Image: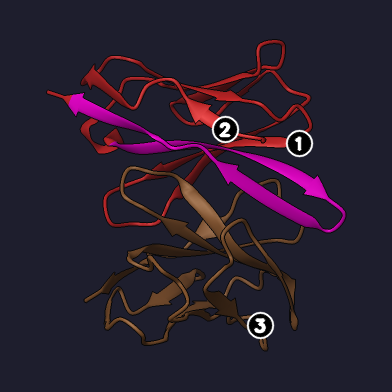
Amino acid sequence: DGGITQSPKYLFRKEGQNVTLSCEQNLNHDAMYWYRQDPGQGLRLIYYSQIVNDFQKGDIAEGYSVSREKKESFPLTVTSAQKNPTAFYLCASSRDRSSGGYTFGSGTRLTVV
Amino acid sequence: GESVGLHLPTLSVQEGDNSIINCAYSNSASDYFIWYKQESGKGPQFIIDIRSNMDKRQGQRVTVLLNKTVKHLSLQIAATQPGDSAVYFCAENMLTGTASKLTFGTGTRLQVTL
């Protein structure tokens, strides 16, 4: 079955450490996205990529970095520069210029300890 | 700035009744409006979308209404079931060039009572 796989589901990080969240899709979608969700709030866009080897900052890119070396993969690194990294991170993909029917992964819950 | 908001943070509905979830938007240039359902600990799931040049669209047990005059979007769920309990998000999508970019509202929690 096609879909998006995020790993790990739960992640704990010590302050000052970088951590990378994985996102893989086998839907042959061109575009991929990373969102952050805080409790009781909506989703905020961190980074997005419309094509391999290209990506753009979203609304809250500070303290995050991404790469898009393969169409199927869009990993997100939460760096030590991110002051409040504890959140639920969601990866999504869509056909290029999609109407909005994004397919989301099941998310990674990151906790800083 | 542009925003997508919701009128009610929590909605309680009795099983079998119809549910109506409302959303206000501010960006008149949006091309599509979308409803997502999110269950606890999971990613959002696409429910239905509507193009900006339409007023109504129906799916299985769901109907989305778009009123561009007052910038209002609603999701109607017929014969609400316990499995419908979740947080519902509206989102707007403005297509530019080769890109699409969703802006999400804060969500409405639907509680289905027996």
Mark 2 or 1: in front is 2
Q: Residue at x 60, y 34 (%)?
A: B3
Residue behind mark 2? B4
Report the chain holding disc 1.
B
Disc 2 residue type (three-letter): Val
Furthest residue in direction top, as rendered? B69
Front-lying residue, A1 or A105? A105
Helix, strand or loop for the magenta stretch, by majority: strand
Quarter the C terminus of chain B occupies: top left
Asked whether the residues under the numbered discs 1 and 3 touch, taking CB atoms below 8 Å apart as contact, a structural biologist would say no
Q: Quick one: B45 or B60, which is closer to the camera?
A: B45
Disc 1 element: loop
**Which residue is label 1 attached to?**
B31
* Residue A13 visible, this orientation: yes
Choose the circle earlier in sequence order: 2 or 1.
2
Question: What residue sits right under mark 3 in the picture?
Answer: A68
**In this rendering, position of residue B44 left or right of residue A96:** left
**Chain in red on the image:** B
Q: Chain of mark 3?
A: A
Give percent across and percent down for residue A91: 50, 66
Q: Give the residue type at disc 1.
A: Asp
